[in-house]
Image: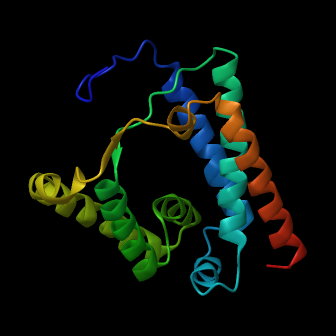
Amino acid sequence: MKHSEIRPRKDKSSLVWGLGFGIVFGFLLHKGGATKYDVIIGQLLLTDFTVVKIMLSAVFTGMIGIYTLKTLGLVELYPKYGSFGKNIIGGLIFGVGFAVLGYCPGTIAGAIGNGYLDALIGGLAGILIGTGLFAALYPRLSRAILNKGDFGDLTLPQLFKVNDWIVVIPVAVLIFLLLYWLERAGL
């Protein structure tokens, strides 16, 4: 499949499922405290690891869930094409916004839902301004940086030429051990 091909949606049920999971994820972010400015700043200062624990738990659960569904033939995965240039630019944009405002896109939505005005005004404005700037600069960025180090839609199991679970299980064990260690250390 070529990079520019568009896959038509077979049905709209995936949108409903996505909305439902998004609402649940937002609720869990709120319950976990990840929509609170103090928790986010604590993470940036490496004094509160609540956000890391929430995100690692989500990666662990999502990875096991997605690959189980894939193994059962219930989903097909279509990884996005990637490059080191895209990762660097995306990381810089994400990092600057996160450091300046103290929220990431997911926690901004949760904080807006909580009624936090800093997230509504600063966060929403930041998302709109950042998106507009990126769109305006995209042609130049694409030529100069974004496509540097292109690695296509290659996944680690494909790279190592192994079954998905040969990568998923050790990564899941490492995440679990890291979460256990963070909890035991009181971080």
Q: Is 163 drawn above or below residue 64 in the view shown?
A: above
Q: Tell whether 174 sits left or right of 107.
A: right
Q: Tell whether 118 sits left or right of 36.
A: left
Q: Residue 59, image x and y in percent?
A: 65, 49
- Residue name at image x 66 percent, y 41 percent: 62
Q: Is 173 drawn above or below residue 112 in the view shown?
A: above
Q: Residue 103, image x and y in percent?
A: 49, 71
Q: Residue 136, image x and y in percent?
A: 12, 58
| Colouring style | rainbow
Rendered image quadrant of residue 35? bottom right
Q: Residue furthest right?
A: 184
Q: Tell whether 10 sits left or right of 66.
A: left
Q: Tell whether 130 sits left or right of 178.
A: left
Q: How many marks?
A: 0
Q: Residue 96, image x and y in percent?
A: 37, 76
Q: Residue furthest front?
A: 160
Rendered image quadrant of residue 1? top left
Q: Is 90 drawn above or below residue 99 in the view shown?
A: above
Rendered image quadrant of residue 132? bottom left
Looking at the image, which is closer to me, 97 or 151? Answer: 151
